[in-house]
Amino acid sequence: MSTSEIQGERIAADRPSERKPQAEGGDRGLAEPDGRKNTMPPELPAVRILIVDDDKAICEYMQTLLERDGFQVKTLSDPTGVEEEVRHGGYHLIILDLMMPKLDGIEVLRRIRKLDTDIAVVIFTGFPNLESAVASMKLDAVDYIKKPFNVDEFREVISRVMRKKGLARTPEEQLHRVIGDTIRNLRKDKDLTLKQMSRRTGLSVSLLSQIERAESSASISSLYKIAIALESRIQDLFGEY
């Protein structure tokens, strides 16, 4: 094909009037020249956050900050209502003030853990001390924020918690989660332990575990070895992507 023909094709492709209209009831994906659909990544589910602090001004400030970052946020200034919220709210993360008049944060955290052992809890306090830090960590608080807080540090803590708990916030992180879940499910379907997978793939147990928990980005080489070990195709590890 000549240079003039290539340039002509590029110009024609760039003209909006010459683009093919999307079919009615349209797909989200765009049609490729060979008729295949270029599917968009699945929509990320909203992460729900509950803020528990008797200071309403702080609750409103954090709510505004987090909602701007795309989170679904509810605030609670009365800690005695936490148990009801945990039962029915479907929260992924709770930001919990340590010093409150009706119930202290450690007691609230104990009550949360009786209902939900997995939900991420970040302790938020203006009076940090070693005793409260140890007590909260024993109850599986995932992080500790001091008042007054720096906005960038606060966002970094939230981001760190999202990664640690597998609550992906970007398409790339979501892809890692999909790959990890798919590998784990395929491995369990075949009744394979991580040690057995390690022997089959030549990858360490630690790396395999990190890939399954979406804490490590697997290389194409690693994914190929894992797919062979699971008697699967490498593209099957990507789920709906």
Image (cartoon, grey):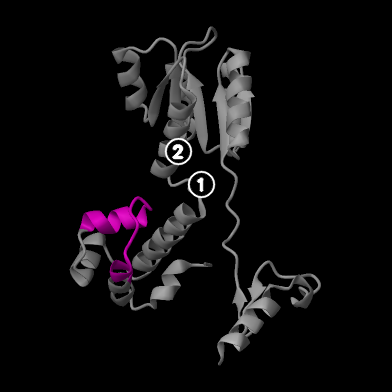
- Residue that badge 1 annotates: 169
Quick one: SS at disc 1? Answer: loop
Quarter of the image with the N terminus is: bottom right
Badge number at residue 159: 2
In the rendered structure, which disc, 1 or 2, sits on the residue that comes first in sequence? 2
Residues 28 and 180: in front is: 28
Magenta segment: 205-223
The x, y position of residue 153, in whole percent, is 43, 27
Q: Residue at x 45, y 41 (%)?
A: 162
Amino acid beneath label 2: Ser
Residues 40 and 196: in front is: 40
The x, y position of residue 81, in whole percent, is 61, 21
Prevalent SS, magenta region: helix
Q: Is residue 220 magenta?
A: yes
Cα distance in 3D space between marks 1 and 2: 8 Å
Q: Is residue 155 above or below residue 21?
A: above
Quick one: SS at disc 2? Answer: helix
The x, y position of residue 202, in whole percent, is 19, 68
Amino acid beneath label 1: Arg
Q: Is residue 221 magenta?
A: yes
Residue 227 quadrant: bottom left
Q: Residues within 10 Å of mark 1 (few under 14, many from 20)?
A: some
